[in-house]
Image (cartoon, helix red, strand yellow):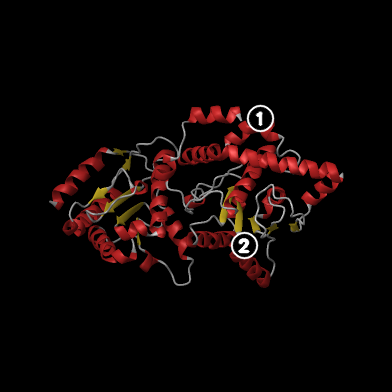
Amino acid sequence: MAVTQFYNWHQQAIKSMDEVDDIQTESNYRYDAFISYCHQDSGFSQVVIDNMNEVDQELSIFIDVQSLKTGVAWQKALYEAIDDSKSVIAIVTPAYIQSKVCYEEYSLAMALHQERHQLSKKRFYFYPVIVGKTVELPDEFSHQNMLKCQRDEDSKQIIAEASKHLCLKLKENIVEKSKDSSTLDYILAQWRMSQFIQNSQQIISHLEIFQAKTSVQNTTSGMKVGLSRTLLSKKTYLAKSSKDKAYNIAQDNRYIAIVNAKSEEDAAITLRNMLLRVMPKATVTVLQQPKTQEQTHQRLKILDEVDMAVALLSPRYVTSAKLVEELHIMLFRQRSNPSKCIFFPIYIYELPKNPVYFRLLNCRYACFDLFWHILCTNSRLKTLVESVFSKISMQSQLALACAAVDIFRYLYHEDNETFDIILNLNKIKEDDIRIKEMTRILKSM
């Protein structure tokens, strides 16, 4: 039974592959295979290792209990190991489906499968093996190469055959065909646009209220020049006015920290000023780069205590070891509190292709997305942010203004959802809207 089932799956897998003569060099990959599994199912992971080693003892296999060094930031190490692997075999069990970390590993593997098959002829094999006939598989875990064990007693045998099959494919000049011709960046950009459109009316409504209130205050006090100077101030600013309830803000203050590379300081100051327009009672801090060990500890303490940590991501950010270390602290904190948004990433500039997890963060705002340029041609939206003095482009200002409103909405629980830290391609494709319809809506705003 198990042999027949595996043979049928093997024949289907062959149909999704092409033989090529010019596969790009893979010498830069550290691992031949990454084993994604839940620790409760370690027996299955050992079956994978034993059978892959039986075929080729020279294979480099990543499995966390053997490959992670003591004291290493495990989350960062796992993400980067997946990126550094030629293949991922996932042992999907009921425990695996319930694990947040396993969900992230699975999502990253799907993204790499999409990325490498569209941008180059790099091989990447992703083999999810579903163990247990009673497993109810969520849509997020579906995949074209999925192998499901129909009987529990066949699980180890099928996993063994799949492991050997993977070893053989790693030696052949073949790449898998992807059923989706879209690039990863395209899919993510379309998702961000669809998310904005779905919430656009609420966002625009809030912007109009905040803009009207600011205009009244400026006209009454005659302090337009003074306001510009305040907006340019690099010091943390805590607004004192608190009686106006037009924003439906609770009486407690909120603490927001903005983390950025030095090259994105102008964007950080602009965002801080916009947040203070939206939440005049909030404390918004642009964290300064630490110069001493004591300042570093204080900075980490702030990130652990704030109501919201906002990361402005750029190439300079993701190449800074200290900032990346802080990013993983923020990600860990968000994973531990999935019922509320306490980490809000914003892409300021396009990021390097690798490692892919930076581009797969649950980020709804990218200042470089084309649809912000479309929105900038609309006078109604443009006038809502142009009164703020800023050194950055109007396109980036508009994106940051809308992000500030979304941060307000999340802090005051206008949106109730579970916040994943890594996006799942199956999940975000369900949220997508047709391109023509989205473009029409944008132009009508």
Rate crowding at label 2 as few (under 14), some (14 to 19) or many (20 or more) other CA atoms within 10 Å: some
Q: Secondary structure at mark 1?
A: loop
* Label 1 CA crowd tier, 10 Å (few <14, some 14–19, many 20+): some
**Mark carried by residue 378:** 1
Residue found farthest to the right: 222
Instruction: Please state if 36 lies on the left or on the right of 348 as rendered.
Output: left
Instruction: Classify the position of the C terminus by image quarter.
Output: top right
* Upstream in sequence: badge 1 or badge 2: 2
Please provide percent x and percent y for residue 24: 40, 44
Which residue shows up at 79% across the image and 42% down it? 216
x then y, percent, for residue 85: 39, 54
Question: What residue lies at 20% left-to-right and 59% top-to-bottom?
Answer: 156
Query: In the rendered structure, which amino acid carries the disc numbered 1?
Result: Asn
Q: Is residue 248 left or right of residue 330?
A: right
Q: In the rendering, which numbered label is found on residue 99?
A: none
> Marks 2 and 1: in contact by CB < 8 Å?
no
Q: Is residue 423 above or below residue 52?
A: above
- On screen, residue 207 above or below 254: above
Q: Secondary structure at mark 2?
A: loop
Residue labelled with disc 2: 306
Can residue 183 be seen in the rendering of this structure? yes
Residue 29 visible in image: no
